[in-house]
Image (cartoon, rainbow, N blue to C red):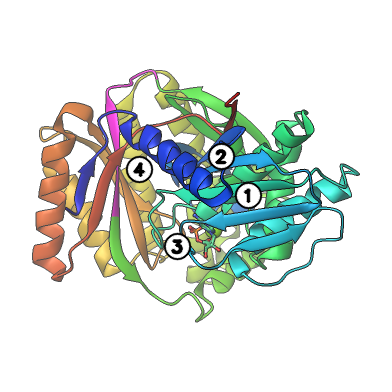
Amino acid sequence: GNLMIEHNDDAFQQLQSVAKEKFVEEFGIDPFWMVSAPSRVNLIGEHIDYCDGFVLPLAINRHIVIAAAPNGTSQANMVSTLFPGEPAVVMVDEDPVMGEPRWANYIRGVLDGFRLKDLWPLPGFDAVVHSNIPLGAGLSSSAAIEVALATLVEGLLGIEINPKNKALLCQRAEQKFAGVPCGIMDQFVSVFAQPDHVVLIDCRSQQAQPIPLADTSVAVIIADTKIQHELSDGSYANRRKQTEIALMILGKDSWREVSMADLEEAKGEMSEVVFQRARHVITEIERTQKAAMAIARGKMDEVGGLMRASHLSLRDDFEVSCRELDIMVEGAWHIGEAGGVLGSRMTGAGFGGSTVTLARAEQAESVMEAMSRNYKQETGIEPHIFSTKAVGGAELSDLL
Ligand code: ADP
Ligand code: MG
């Protein structure tokens, strides 16, 4: 159905066994390694990654897994269950270059990162990539595949690189080999996540700090509106530009040095729209830090209030929500605490995509049903809604 609750780790076990079976079928031997890397959802801290702000994502129980073994050649032979009939062969003793199949560019990008570290040439290997990350829901499968591959290469070489450098290597792969000017969130959370933790990432210092969920009785509900408005009309670039203009008018080097008092003082020097954009940035930076502290203290009602304020700020000041996101979020708000909802907001760049909702675990099922019913009634669209929890980061296991 379109509602799914993950009660335990069955989905993850299942994912690994399929990857293993597929490997045996494809290469005729048992795999030596199994690696996994999670996808993520951002709880709060939206549109401030490019403003020296914070993000507060958690890794979710949807992964890329790779089953692999060394093959004694100078080739990486890779297949993905997502792209049957499009196997990839990448030389591990030549400079990686972009090419076909396109899914392997993420692989080539990561390999190129190891080449730049002089960890080159690599031993050849065979690998099967398998995933249960929903496509097009903005959960960052691309970062997961990069981090999974980097983790595999660590296993191949019998080394562990510094986790921050590993995440940055993966970010570079996405930027240079997929042409996506991404920030650091997705790769950092896939590397640094811990079970029952969120990850506070400081986008200025590029430091990641796992924050324990003091209250682990919460479910994280992700609701895909199935709406994807075009971002190519320049809305994203336009928001970035407006925040740059605001900072210039404020005469500061970083948003971290700007207070609401500073903004009020400079109000007469900027347009109403630029003022609103700036207010979002300043208040969202503050909300994200507060949310991290509230999570560590188990104050989930406080987190919920911050998520609500974040959504309103994104809707009214930053203007990146849309009708469908508002309907989904308001549906959750309407269920309220009595019905088990702690907080809800849009997540991701906006203009469609998904919402994130915190709910009491024992009421997650009824929350999802009510959210789905409301959304369908208001929009006529069948959403995809599932419940998950905060899982750990990338792992390598030796199957021998
Ligand atoms: P997302 O929001 O999921 O990161 P992207 O467009 O950034 O969306 O990345 C999706 C791309 O990542 C796919 O088109 C494919 O190239 C690659 N990818 C994701 N999952 C897999 C997989 N299981 N096997 C191979 N490639 C994958
Ligand atoms: Mg991506």
How far is mark 3 from mark 2, CA to CA?
A: 28 Å
Q: Which residue is mark 2?
A: 190
Q: Are marks 4 and 2 in contact (CB under 8 Å)?
A: no
Which percent across, then down, holds residue 195? 45, 25
Which of the labelled discs sits on residue 17, or is there none?
Answer: none
Q: N-terminal of the two: label 3 or label 4? A: 4
Which of the labelled discs sits on residue 307, or is there none?
Answer: 4
Q: Are marks 1 and 2 in contact (CB under 8 Å)?
A: yes
- Residue 374 lies, with reference to residue 216, above or below; the image says below
Question: Is 227 covered by the magenta stretch?
Answer: no
Q: Quadrant of ligand 2?
A: bottom right
Q: Which residue is mark 3?
A: 318
Q: Which residue is mark 1?
A: 146
Q: N-terminal of the two: label 3 or label 2? A: 2
Which percent across, then down, holds residue 121? 87, 47
Residue type beneath disc 4: Met
Residue type beneath disc 3: Phe
How far is mark 1 from mark 3, CA to CA?
A: 31 Å
